[in-house]
Image (cartoon, grey):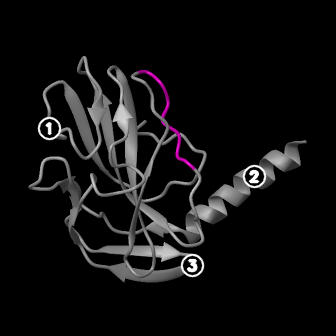
Amino acid sequence: MEHKLFDKRLSGVLERMRNACLTAAGVSADATTGDIELDNAQTIVINGQIYSNEAVAAIDLSADATVGGVKIPAGKKAAILVLVNATGTEKLMLTNIVAAAGDIVIPEFDTAAYVCVAAVKISNGTAVDFTIGTTALNTASVTTTYIDVFNVIPGEIPPWS
């Protein structure tokens, strides 16, 4: 039984070495208050190969089919993950929506094609729903944390949860 646990941990370590973001993406709020941007070029590793991607001036959260319009209820939190592939194409994913004291968990994603370079954690302290892409990220009583991510794997609870 112990060897299975060791194999799982070793597999996670190897995955981290083969897939990572090596430089800070510089995730921040865009001039449009409901959107984000990646201020820096990123150097990423996918399956052991190194790639460079340009900065991204604006990522329109409202237009994204995965996260746009999703509601984070009052007293809950979640994170939007920014994934990029070797050609610089961004893909957005939403973590689980949990109570303020709960643990955010990284969802499954295609680690053979994408690397997570950033996260935007939204903690909704208002009395109403926060709607991604519609509600401003700097709304009073909403805590928005912009996180440069260097290495996450699906299923883990990140330290910034």
Which residue occupies the extreme left position in the image?
31
Mark 2 or mark 3, which is nearer the start of the sequence? 2
Q: Residue at x 29, y 64 (%)?
A: 25
Q: Is residue 16 above or below residue 81?
A: below
Comparing 69 with 15, the one in front is: 69
User: Which of these two is toward me, 29 or 61?
Assistant: 61
Q: Which residue is mark 2?
A: 8
Q: Where residue 67 sits: x, y (%)?
A: 38, 49
Q: Kindly give the residue lying farthest to the right in the view shown.
A: 1
Confirm whether the magenta stretch covers residue 34: no
Where is residue 24 shown, x and y percent of the image? 30, 63
Locate the N terminus and report the quarter of the image it occupies: top right
User: Which residue is disc 1 drawn over?
Assistant: 138
Q: Residues within 10 Å of mark 1 (few under 14, many from 20)?
A: few
> CA–CA distance between discs 1 and 2?
40 Å
| Helix, strand or loop status at disc 3 | loop
Q: Please state, as top left, top right, bottom left or bottom right, where the C terminus lies in the image.
A: top left
Give me the C-alpha separation between circle 3 and circle 1: 38 Å
Give the quarter of the image for residue 69. top left
Mark 3 and mark 2 residues within 8 Å of each other at the beta carbon: no
Q: What's the residue type where badge 1 is placed?
A: Asn
**At 22% across and 29% down in the image, what residue appears?**
142
Q: Residue at x 38, y 25 (%)?
A: 76
Residue 48 is labelled as 3
Mark 3 is on which residue type?
Answer: Gly
Counting from the top left corner in percent of width and height, residue 157 is at 53, 39
Image location of residue 159, percent across then percent down: 45, 40
